[in-house]
Amino acid sequence: AAYLTGVAWLHGVPFDADERAIVPRSLIAEPLADGTLDAVLGREPHHVLDLCTGNGSLAVLAALAWTGCRVLGTDLSADALALAQSNLARHALADRVELRRGDGLAALRDGECFDLVLCNPPYVNAASMSSLPPEFRAEPALALAGGHDGMDFVRPLLAGLAAHLLPEAALVLEIGHERVHFDVAFPGLEPLWLATSAGDDQVLLLTREQLAARRTTRLTTHEARSR
């Protein structure tokens, strides 16, 4: 329906929508819009990164929620970014939201850091991709397919993101119905799970300290195995 009408609404905000990006529906919009993130963070973020921005809906919502922040939205798809640009113009936010093309963290520059990262990545596992309903198969597979266990994008993200986070920064990550695969892929990691209308195990928050500690542990383990 969104593709037919050319518009979709997310938390009362209208967005241009077409086949260049998935229909905006990220559950991250809920804790962002209802004040949950403000309460958890305890401050207003000033530098926000929206990884896999798609049509730019989360980047727009972040800029509307925190009027003093600047937002960078990145995506691998040039088509999605063109659609996101139209949404920035729609909401007169082109002066505070920058769009950049790139594959995950490769889109970032050396030394570029943020105090909040939002990410609704491709996370649908291969088995689920093969049985998606027709309306989801009409959307770009690039924005949905997350590999065998749905974690292909998430693994390098968690391994490298700490280098781009300021002290006391956080990552808010949507994984949908992939909680089981997430727990297997990242044993011992204990994120804060944020309540959403779809359940309490689909959107998580990790601090910079958690990500940095995980990276240190992985490097130490690798060094030990190499000796």
Image (cartoon, rainbow, N blue to C red):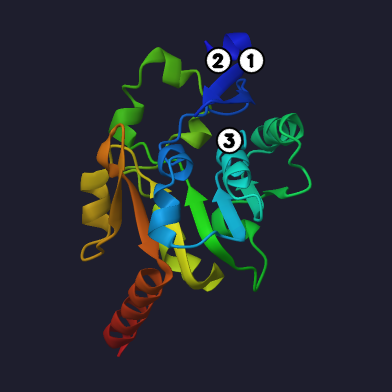
Q: Secondary structure at mark 2?
A: helix
Q: Which residue is mark 2?
A: 2
Question: Within the image, what quadrant is residue 5 found in?
Answer: top right
The residue at the point 52 percent across, 10 percent down is: 1
Count residues near mark 2 (Cα–Cα under 10 Å), then give few for <14, some for 14-19, many for 20+: some
Name the amino acid type tagged 3: Ser
Q: Which is nearer the N-term, disc 3 or disc 2?
A: 2
Q: Position of residue 211 (x, y in %)?
A: 39, 69
Q: Secondary structure at mark 1?
A: loop
The tally of labels here is 3
In the current view of this chain or complex, which residue is farthest to the bottom?
227
**C-alpha span from label 3 to label 1:** 14 Å
Question: Within the image, what quadrant is residue 185 found in?
Answer: bottom left
Q: Which is nearer the N-term, disc 3 or disc 1?
A: 1
Q: Position of residue 169 (x, y in %)?
A: 48, 67
Name the amino acid type tagged 2: Ala
Seen from the viewer's position, the closer of residues 227 and 53 is 53
Name the amino acid type tagged 1: Gly
The residue at the point 59 percent across, 56 percent down is: 48
Residue 64 shown left or right of residue 132 in the figure: right
Cβ atoms at labels 3 and 1 below 8 Å apart: no
**C-alpha span from label 3 to label 2:** 14 Å
Q: Position of residue 49 (x, y in %)?
A: 58, 55
Residue 203 shown left or right of residue 138 in the figure: left
Q: Is residue 152 visible?
A: no
Q: Which residue is mark 1?
A: 6
Q: On the rendered image, what quadrant is the C terminus found in? A: bottom left
Cβ atoms at labels 1 and 2 below 8 Å apart: yes
Q: Position of residue 34 (x, y in %)?
A: 43, 40
The residue at the point 20 percent across, 46 percent down is: 180
| Label disc, if present, on residue 57 of the rendered structure | 3
